[in-house]
Image: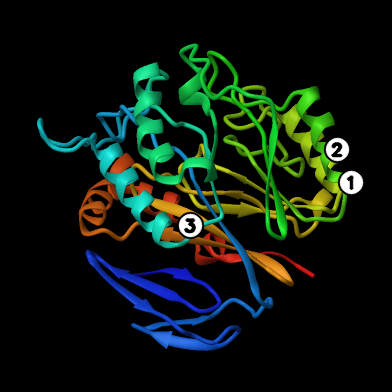
Amino acid sequence: MELTTVAEDLAVVHDDGEVRRYEDLEPDTLYEHDGFVYRTLPDLGALVARVGTVNDVHFGETECGVISGMDLGPVLSVPDGAEPYPELMNRCAIAEMRRADLDAVVVKGDLTCNGTDDEYRTFLAFYEDAFEERLHHVRGNHDSYHGGTFAARDPFVVDVPGVRLAVLDTARDALTSGRVSDHQLTWLRDLATEGDTPILLFGHHHVWSPDSRERPESYFGIHPDDSERLVEVVAAHRTIVGYFAGHTHRNRVRRVSATSDVPWAEVACVKDFPGVWAEYRIFERGITQIVHRISDPEALAWTERTRAMYGGTYDQYAFGELSDRCFVVARW
């Protein structure tokens, strides 16, 4: 049994395949449900807008739990003739996001498994049909590694009420790690000085922390040199209130000394455990991140199977703490 989600008005408990939703709660109030004691997120005023994000949707993938050079197991798949699990999980995620009445949807990378045009067309068939002009997307390493050029684009901004969404392409051809170019950093500096509207920054790869004692050239996320420069831009422009990535397939929030309380967040994937999408609620006096576990019974059956991947270590790694999933991004 897990307390999956806590917002200012909502809590969700998952008990294997059973979902218990506790709604119409009071903000900043202590509750106890199903043995969990928790406090709802604070009252930040009237709701202005909602933004949804997903990442690591991996259309075209057929085997789950594979890491090159490692044999931890189990490797999982679905029977021949069954709906492919990326299509199942994304179909269910889309259904939940459509019910949430979102102002924008950002898909932040790994749209495909093998970077093929056919996989990308499948992604578009699912997401463009569902969200039309509200959809915005960028590539990840699975899309760029094999030389795919789709969704490679200049940084762009999406304006929704109360906030600006800035999206970076952090992918590099033939590499799994990421980068942020000089052009993107200059663009971001200029954007951050255009006004005082808060900016939520999105990209596929997570940053290396400048507080780290190690500086590996082969860092799995954004290269340390580029990470350091990106952190410097955020530190110099307080309009940028958070950076939100995928790539690692886990829920995690870090804060670095140079940017104080600014969250550098990673959100778990859609395609396997825990199977989530993230909501950003924009209020008059702040912004929150709310991670939702996809709760369709078919989706839960698949994500419960994939919980045991990587020698049984995946559930603790991927799920994170409640504070990694649901938190105040910024308040004013």
Q: Is residue 26 above or below residue 67?
A: below
Q: Earlier in the sequence, mark 2 or mark 1?
A: 2
Q: Nearer the viewer, mark 2 or mark 1?
A: 2
Answer with mark 3 or mark 2, whichever residue precedes in sequence: 2
120 sits left or right of 92 in the view:
right
Q: Earlier in the sequence, mark 1 or mark 3?
A: 1
Q: Which mark is residue 236?
A: 1
Q: Secondary structure at mark 3?
A: loop
- Tell me whether circle 2 and circle 1 mark residues in contact (CB < 8 Å): yes
Mark drawn on residue 77: none
Q: Which residue is mark 3?
A: 320
Residue at 40% across, 25% down: 120
Vertical placement of 66 versus 299: above or below?
Answer: above
234 vs 61: above or below: below
Residue 275 appears in the rendering: no
Where's the N terminus, which quadrant? bottom left
Instruction: Give the quadrant of residue 113.
Output: top left
Asked which secondary structure carries label 2, the reply is: helix
Residue type at numbered disc 3? Gly
Residue 85 image offset from top left, x and y in percent: 25, 39
Residue at x 54% of width, y 65% of height: 326
The Cα atoms of the two marked residues, 2 and 1, are separated by 9 Å
Residue located beneath label 2 in the image: 189
**Which amino acid lies under the numbered mark 1 shown in the image of this protein?**
Ala
Expressed as whole percent of the image width and height from the top left, the position of residue 295 reads 31, 60
Q: Is residue 72 left or right of residue 223?
A: left
**Residue depicted at x 34% and y 42%:** 271
